[in-house]
Image (cartoon, rainbow, N blue to C red):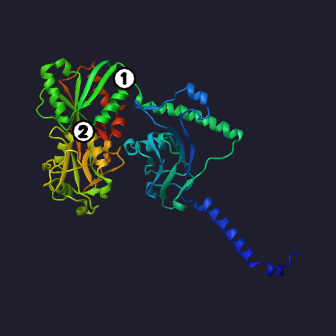
Amino acid sequence: MLDFSELGNIDLGTVIALVSLIGTSIVWLLDRYLWRRKRLVYRVQVDAQIGVHPRQTRAREMVDIEVVHQGTVVQDPSIVLLRMDNAGTDVDARDMQKPVGFSFPDRRIVRMKVVESQPPDLGELIEQNMKPVDYVDTDRIEVPKLAINRGDHFKFLLVLSGTGKEVKHSGYLAGGANGGIYHEPRPRGPGRRTLIFGATTLLLVGALVAFFLVDVLQPPDNCRSGQLRVIGSTAVERTMTELRSAYASECSEADITIAANGSRSGVRDLNTLGAQDPAAAGKVIAMSDGPAADAPNLGGEAVAVVVFAVVVNRSADLTGLTTGQLRDIYTGKVTNWKQLGGKDLPIRMVSRVGPDSGSRLVFREKVLGGVQELGITSDDCRSDDDPVAKYHRCEVGTTDELLTRVNEIDGAIGYAELGSARRFAGLAAATIDDVVPDTSKVADRSYKFWEVEHAYTYKAPDAKSLTGAFLDYLRSTEARPVLERGGLVPCGALPPGFCG
């Protein structure tokens, strides 16, 4: 028979420990089965480099594995298969108070695809709300703010370039303990079932990688042979080069040359060539930032909206400007970043050469309100050749030259196409009147610095010609991801009549 009088001899610390243990267990059970907090759990199911295992020396001598995406070799390719489950209560879009995202340090995203989801339409909804321009060539993806119900799950399959090996998460769910985002490690231990599962998973992932790496490189339906030269805008030169590579990689008899020389120069050269040699002019497309004037023999069509940005070297420590401040800079009223709240550095303006630049014309009309830029004070953008001038300004011939100079020179500022600007780590794309330069800000016209990109030909091209086929390709769904990654918004993705 239990003598309850002995309870008085139990150590007080033991009693407290027992009560704490029972209390913790009750709270855990209530949280797990009654309260059910908001909880998103993710697991990195695969994170592996694509290639032969380093120890297989003989195999490496015999096999040369190369991953190519849109005509470009992917450097240090790797794959990541990442699964996310809702293991708590239903999550509403409003619950994602801080974006739920994943980053891949020292790696850049080549492509992403949702390869599995439950329910199936959840994956489609996620992909529809994730624009490639927002994550391709970055080190981070963010889950769109959508409702994810209890028991829902989805998987991201990514191909990345770079030597990093980590996957990090961020985000905050209202109503979730410790932020509501949990990492579930992969099971450890080389058991037989684990090895079989791992081998099977890698085989499946390899098949998926092969599928979606070539997904945007499906051969165009209208392959044509012959020669074509694309001239004009340097703002879209990189994008046109990628489109050329994607088309020519499947249409091997198509010989396409990109020779950007400025919007107005391209249109003028095509118009002159048409008057001299109509047959040769029929093998040329001139890209123009905005509609061309005084070219009655040319036929033009709107292809996409090209988004421009004011770019500032990060040394200035200032990434937000108003149109009034920009006009003060480009009229010489403000000459030091300190006057605008930045570092004590002279402002060095890097501009495009002369009136043939489409981006310069758009900048003058959309940002400066028609104000002409000042005269040149420097040939190399660093030293000043005019000892009297109180401002600093130089001019360069192409978009890449401008971005390179602004990226390298402390205190520099310039303007260029947004997609190209994102490739330079030393640059910041400045907000203009508190609006972030982004393709999503075009449709509602809240961002002003953009123009409609036109493709001009000499009269109407033959539908069976390479010129006609490539124009069709520019309008196709196959070309859309390339345009979007370059910071362009296809006209087909905008409201009717938006592109004119």
In front of the other: 497 or 6: 6
CA separation in Å, label 1 and label 2: 33 Å
Quadrant in which the C terminus appears = top left
Q: Residues within 10 Å of mark 1 (few under 14, many from 20)?
A: few
Earlier sequence position, callout 1 versus callout 2: 1
Quadrant in which the N terminus appears = bottom right
Across and down, in percent, residue 354 comes to 15, 40
Residue 217 figure quarter: top left
259 left or right of 209? left
200 left or right of 169? right
Q: Residues within 10 Å of mark 2 (few under 14, many from 20)?
A: many
Query: Which element type, helix, strand or loop, lies under badge 2?
Result: loop
Residue farthest toward the right in the current orientation of the protein: 1
Residue 484 figure quarter: top left
Across and down, in percent, residue 166 comes to 53, 48
The residue carrying mark 2 is 398
What residue lies at 43% left-to-right and 49% top-to-bottom?
144
Mark number displayed over residue 221: 1
Across and down, in percent, residue 397 comes to 22, 39
Q: Nearer the viewer, mark 1 or mark 2?
A: 2
Which amino acid, mark 2?
Thr
337 left or right of 44? left
